[in-house]
């Protein structure tokens, strides 16, 4: 099947995202944009994934579960799973490795952990876009070994992408690389190139998406689908 996917969406848990980005609001926006599969990838924390799982199941919308991890070099990387439990296990390890810098809600945002019905359960204490103590060179194999799709985020941005933070795109076995511009940077064509929204507000969901031909929304099937995006 041909599918429109957006695998880079933040919920209200991410400090830079709108509080309106509840799981049900994200799904409503995805359906409005005609997306066939989405992923929740909050900064450094996975505690809104259970509510996202329930909301996607309720709506019949296929999804992946993940987070956007920040390496010690401040490189953002999408780590995406096709099952909830491995995502929670990996994501909690990432959260534990984040620098112990307390969040300032007035300055950065509230970071609420919510239920599927938008009730607030708690708040993430650490500032979620702080860096972990894990090098990008270690994070990539760790994510792959845990069973995730590993996709360096917005590699062509002027900050928080691999090229900006490291000076080049390291030769590692990514499943794809996320590019914001229509014109990918030199060298990126070695990997499948994907475009996702990096949505932090409801109207941003699906503003960029990728079309893939896939048999299923599992990590192996999507890995094969991404491979088809490589130049012939």
Image (spheres, rainbow, N blue to C red):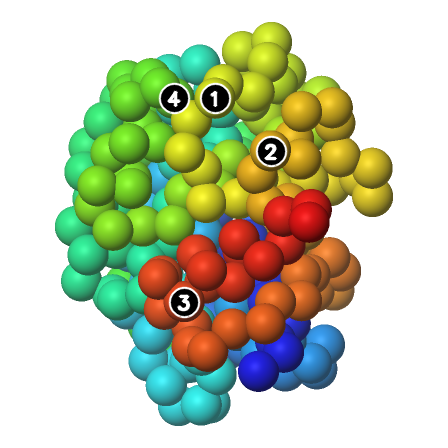
Give residue 28's quadrant in the image: bottom right
Label 1 sits on a secondary structure element that is loop
Q: Which mark is residue 136?
A: 4
Q: Which residue is mark 2?
A: 190
Q: Position of residue 177 (x, y in %)?
A: 57, 39
Q: Which marked residue is nearer to the observer: mark 1 or mark 4?
A: 1
Instruction: Give the Cα separation between the discs numbered 1 and 2.
Output: 9 Å
Residue at the image position 19 percent from the left and 32 percent from the top: 96
The answer to which of marks 4 and 3 sits earlier in the sequence is: 4
Instruction: Give the Cα separation between the discs numbered 1 and 4.
Output: 12 Å
Answer whether labels 1 and 2 touch (C-beta < 8 Å). yes
Answer whether labels 4 and 3 touch (C-beta < 8 Å). no
Residue situated in front as seen by the camera: 109 or 232 = 232
Q: Is residue 86 left or right of residue 42?
A: left
Q: Which mark is residue 171?
A: 1
Q: Where 72 falls versus 96 (above or below)?
A: above
Q: Is residue 142 left or right of residue 18?
A: left
Q: Is residue 142 visible?
A: yes
Residue at the image position 52 percent from the left and 63 percent from the top: 225
Q: Is residue 205 left or right of residue 224?
A: right
Q: Callout 1: 10 Å neighbours few (<14), some, many (20+)?
A: few
Quadrant housing the N terminus? bottom right
Q: Position of residue 133 (x, y in %)?
A: 28, 18
Give residue 160's quadrant in the image: top right
């Amino acid at each position: 099947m041909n599918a429109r996917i957006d695998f880079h969406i933040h919920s209200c848990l991410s400090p830079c995202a709108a509080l309106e980005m509840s799981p049900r609001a994200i799904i409503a926006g995805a359906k409005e944009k005609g997306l066939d599969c989405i992923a929740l990838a909050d900064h450094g924390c996975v505690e809104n994934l259970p509510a996202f799982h329930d909301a996607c199941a309720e709506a019949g919308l296929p999804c992946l579960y993940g987070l956007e991890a920040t390496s010690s070099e401040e490189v953002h990387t999408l780590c995406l799973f096709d099952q909830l439990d491995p995502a929670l296990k990996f994501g909690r390890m990432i959260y534990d490795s984040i620098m112990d810098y307390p969040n300032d809600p007035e300055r950065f945002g509230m970071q609420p952990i919510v239920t599927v019905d938008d009730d607030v359960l708690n708040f993430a204490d650490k500032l979620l876009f702080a860096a972990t103590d894990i090098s990008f060179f270690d994070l990539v194999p760790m994510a792959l070994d845990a069973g995730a799709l590993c996709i360096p985020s917005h590699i062509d941005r002027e900050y928080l992408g691999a090229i900006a933070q490291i000076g080049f795109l390291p030769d590692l076995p990514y499943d794809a690389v996320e590019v914001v511009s229509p014109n990918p940077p030199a060298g990126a064509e070695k990997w499948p190139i994907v475009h996702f929204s990096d949505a932090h507000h409801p109207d941003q969901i699906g503003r960029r998406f990728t079309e893939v031909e896939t048999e299923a929304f599992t990590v192996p099937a999507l890995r094969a689908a991404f491979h088809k995006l490589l130049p012939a």
